[in-house]
């Protein structure tokens, strides 16, 4: 991936930031697991990639602020999605910038988003405050997902 900058690597995927035409995109790359049989790994990776992209689309349709999916490349197990300018809920809480009322509002927003997700039978695979963003310039909570539907 030309012009891509690695942002984070976890056990399941690498996340890059890169230009996408006139936009900026996040690219999530699921990589092969050497401990799995190659055929099984390919099928699981494809299924999880498809599930995540579909879940993101379903969340957006239901009113949950989730990144827009731009492109899905199943052959390379890549999801190109909207880059969300903002910061994590974790960073916000650690900085201690919000008063008690603001933190309560944030907790309610998280609960509301989770209720919508669960109502759609979408379960977040790694629910932490590091995987939730506060969209810059708004009070919107954005969930970065590792979804299992």
Image: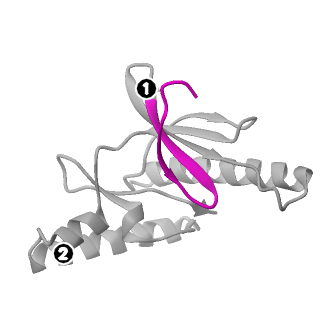
Helix, strand or loop at label 2? It is: helix
Tell me, for residue 56, which label it has, or none: none
The N terminus lies in quadrant: top right
Helix, strand or loop at label 1? It is: strand
Identify the residue under disc 1: 19
In this image, 138 relative to 35: left or right? left
Residue 86 % position (x, y) = 27, 49
- Confirm whether the magenta stretch covers residue 63: no
Q: Nearer the viewer, residue 104 or 59?
A: 104
Q: Residues within 10 Å of mark 1 (few under 14, many from 20)?
A: some
Q: Quadrant of residue 140?
A: bottom left
Q: Residues within 10 Å of mark 2 (few under 14, many from 20)?
A: some
Residue 11 % position (x, y) = 62, 61
Task: State if disc 2 and disc 1 touch (CB < 8 Å).
Answer: no
Residue at 42% in and 62% down = 131
Residue at 19% in and 50% down = 138
Residue 58 % position (x, y) = 53, 52
The C terminus lies in quadrant: bottom right
Answer with mark 1 or mark 2, whichever residue precedes in sequence.
Answer: 1
Give the main secondary structure of the magenta stretch.
strand
In this image, 26 relative to 29: left or right? left
Q: Nearer the viewer, mark 1 or mark 2?
A: 1
Residue at 70% in and 48% down = 31
Residue at 11% in and 80% down = 100
Q: Quadrant of residue 40?
A: bottom right
Tell me, for residue 103, which label it has, or none: 2
In this image, 23 relative to 136: left or right? right
Question: For the magenta stretch, what is the residue range?
Answer: 1-18
Q: Nearer the viewer, residue 22 or 11?
A: 11
Q: Given the current orientation, which residue lies at the most extreme top position?
A: 21
- Confirm whether the magenta stretch covers residue 8: yes
């Amino acid at each position: 991936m030309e012009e891509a900058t690695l942002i984070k690597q976890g056990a399941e995927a690498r996340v890059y930031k890169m230009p996408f035409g006139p936009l900026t995109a996040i690219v999530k790359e699921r990589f092969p697991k050497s401990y799995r049989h190659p055929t099984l790994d390919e099928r699981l990776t494809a299924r999880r990639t498809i599930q995540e992209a579909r879940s993101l689309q379903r969340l957006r349709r239901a009113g949950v602020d989730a990144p827009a999916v731009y492109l899905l490349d199943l052959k390379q197990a890549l999801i190109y999605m909207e880059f969300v300018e903002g910061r994590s809920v974790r960073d916000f809480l650690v900085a201690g910038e919000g008063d008690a009322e603001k933190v309560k509002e944030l907790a309610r927003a998280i609960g509301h988003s989770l209720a919508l997700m669960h109502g759609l039978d979408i379960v977040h695979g790694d629910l932490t405050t590091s995987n939730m963003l506060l969209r810059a310039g708004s009070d919107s909570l954005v969930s970065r997902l590792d979804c299992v539907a």
